Image: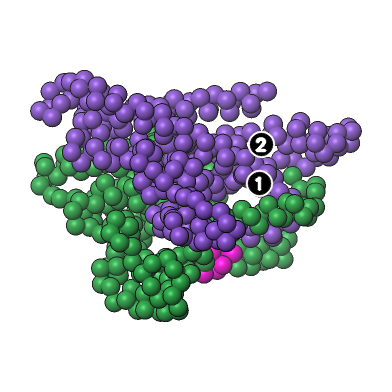
Amino acid sequence: MKSKKPSIPYIIWMVVFTMIPLVMIGITAFTDKQGNFSLEPFQKAFFYTDVFLKSFWIALLSTAISLLLAYPLAYLINRMKKSTQTTVIMLLMIPMWMNFLLRIYAWRTLLQHDGPLDTALSLLGIHGTYMGNTAAVVLGMVYEYLPFMVLPIYTVMGKIDNSLIEAAQDLGSNSFAVFRKVILPLSIPGVISGITMVFVPSASTFLVAQYLGGTDDIMIGDVIDKIFWTDQNTGAAISLILMIFIFIFLILMNFFGDEEAIA
Amino acid sequence: MSSAKGKNGLFSKLYLVLIIVFLYLPIIVFIFFSFNNSMSTVWNGFTLKWYESLFKDKHIMNSLWNTLIIAVLASFFATALGTSAAIGISNIRGKKRTIIQTVSNIPIISPDIVMGVSLMLLFTFLGVIFNFEMGFVTVLLSHICFCVPFVVLNVMPRITRMDRSIYDAALDLGCNQWQAFYKVIIHELMPGIVSGALMSFTYSLDDFIITYFTRGAKFQNLSIEIYAMTHRRISPKVNALSALLFLAVLIIMILINIRDRREEKIRAQKT
C-alpha cells in the first residue's frame, strides 16, 4: 500500500499517449512535407487569423450568455428543497447524455426555413430566417455547454456556510447586500471553472458552426478538420497555436481564481 | 446556503421552466418527427415505420454495438489503470507528484480536436512502423486515454481521506496482503471507482471528435454513423434512434435516482 509501483503502467501510458503525441504535433508543425525544418506551416496558419478571432468571439459570446443564464439558475436551484434540487439537476443533465451531433442537428430542424419555429412565428405574422448566422451558432454553443456552467456554480454555492449568511443578516445586511458581500464573492471559484468549461470547448469544437452557421461562420475546429486530411503540417501548426491560446487562457483563469481566493 | 429554502417566487419558477423547455426543445422535436409519416419536417400522419426500418438496418445496429462495446471496454481498462495509478501516485510526494498530476490532466484541459489530431499523428506513425491500420483498437486506446484522468480524479480524494491504519489492522487480524488490499482498500475506494467508471462510460458513449480522427477508414460507431447521415439527406431513422436513446438514458437516470434515494433513506435510518 505504500508502494509507488502501481503508478508505473500509467506513467508509461502518459508518456506514450499524452507526451509523445504532443511532441509529434510540435515536430509536425515545424516541418514541411518532406520532413525538413520549416516555418511554412506557421506562415500558412496566419492566413486563418480571422478564423481564430471569430472563434474566440463566438466562444466569448457563448460563455457570457451561458454565465448570465446559469448564475441565477444555480442560485435559485440552491434555494429549493434538497430532494427537488436532485431532480432539477438530473433534468439539466439528461440532455447532455444525448449524442452531441443529434442535439445540434435537432436545432437545425427547429430553426430551418418552414421548420417548427418559423411555422409558429409565421402564425403571428413574423417571417424570417433563424439559421445560417452567428446568432444561431452562439445559440447552439449555449445549448451545448450551459449545464457545464450551471453545475460548478451550483456546487460551489451549495457549499457556502449558512452561518456566514446568517451572520451577515444579523449584522443588518439586507438580502441584496448578503448576495453582493457573501454569496457572490464565495461563488467566484465556481464561476471561474464554469467559464473554463464553456469557453474551451466552444472555442475549439467543430461542426456546430457548419450545422447552424452561415458561410462566413467558420470556426478554427472546422479549419483543422478540413486542412488536416490534406496538409498535416499546417493542421498541426494551427492546433499548436490553438493549444497555446487555450493554455494562456487557463493560466489567466487560474490567476484570477487565486486572486479571489486570497481577497 | 439553505436559509431561504423553498422561497422561490413565481418569476424564479417561470425562469426555471423556460430553461428546461429550452434544453428539451430539440429532444421533443426529434421524438415528434420520429413518428412522422414523411421525410420532410411537415406533419403527415402517425407512423412507426422509421422504428421498423431502424431495427432492420444492420449498419446502424452494428454501429450501436460498436459504441457500446467500446464504452464498456474503455471504461473497464480506464478504471483499472486509473485506480492503480491513483494508489501509486498517492505514495509519491513533492515535485514529481505535481508533474505527474499535471500531465495526467492534459487530456481533460486540452481541446478534443487537438487530442484527436495528436493521437492520429501517433497512430499513423506507429502504423507505418508496426504495419497496422487504424480501427477498433486505436479507437479503444484513444477512449481509454481521455477516460483515465477522470478515474484518477475521482479515486484520488478517496485515498487521501482513507484511514491507512485499517489496512494494517487487516494485516494484524490475519489477512494476507492481497486479502487486505481487496477487502479493505478496494472496498474503501469503491464509490470513487464507480463514479470514475460511470463518467468514463458516458464520455465514451458521447464522444465524436476523438473517434472521428482515430477510427481509420472502416470503423463505424453511432456518432460516426450519425455524422455520415447528417451529410446525406437525413433519414427520420435518426430521429427514431434518438428517441430510443433518450428513452434509455431517461430510464437509467430514473433508476440511479431511485437507488440514490433508497441509499439515503437507509443511511438516515442507520443514524
User: Which residue bears the numbered disc 1?
Assistant: A74
B38 shown above or below B175:
below
Q: Which residues are magenta?
A: B251-257
Query: Residue B239: which quarter of the image?
Result: bottom left
Q: Secondary structure at mark 2?
A: helix
Residue B254: within the magenta?
A: yes
Task: Evaluate whether label 2 is on the same chain as label 1.
Answer: yes
| Three-letter amino acid code at the position of disc 2 | Ser
Q: Which residue is painted at 85% across and 36% down in the image? A: A174
Q: Which residue is painted at 17% across and 42% down in the image? A: B124
Residue A86 horizontal side relative to residue A41, left or right? right
User: Which residue bears the numbered disc 2?
Assistant: A187
For the question of whether residue A125 can be seen, the reply is yes
Image hue for chain B: green
Q: Nearer the viewer, mark 2 or mark 1?
A: 1
| Three-letter amino acid code at the position of disc 1 | Ala
| Chain letter for the purple part | A
The x, y position of residue A202, in whole percent, is 45, 40
The x, y position of residue A173, in whole percent, is 86, 33
Q: Which residue is painted at 52% across and 36% down in the image? A: A61
Report in which chain the residue with disc 1 lies. A
Give the position of the C terminus of chain A as an image quadrant. top right
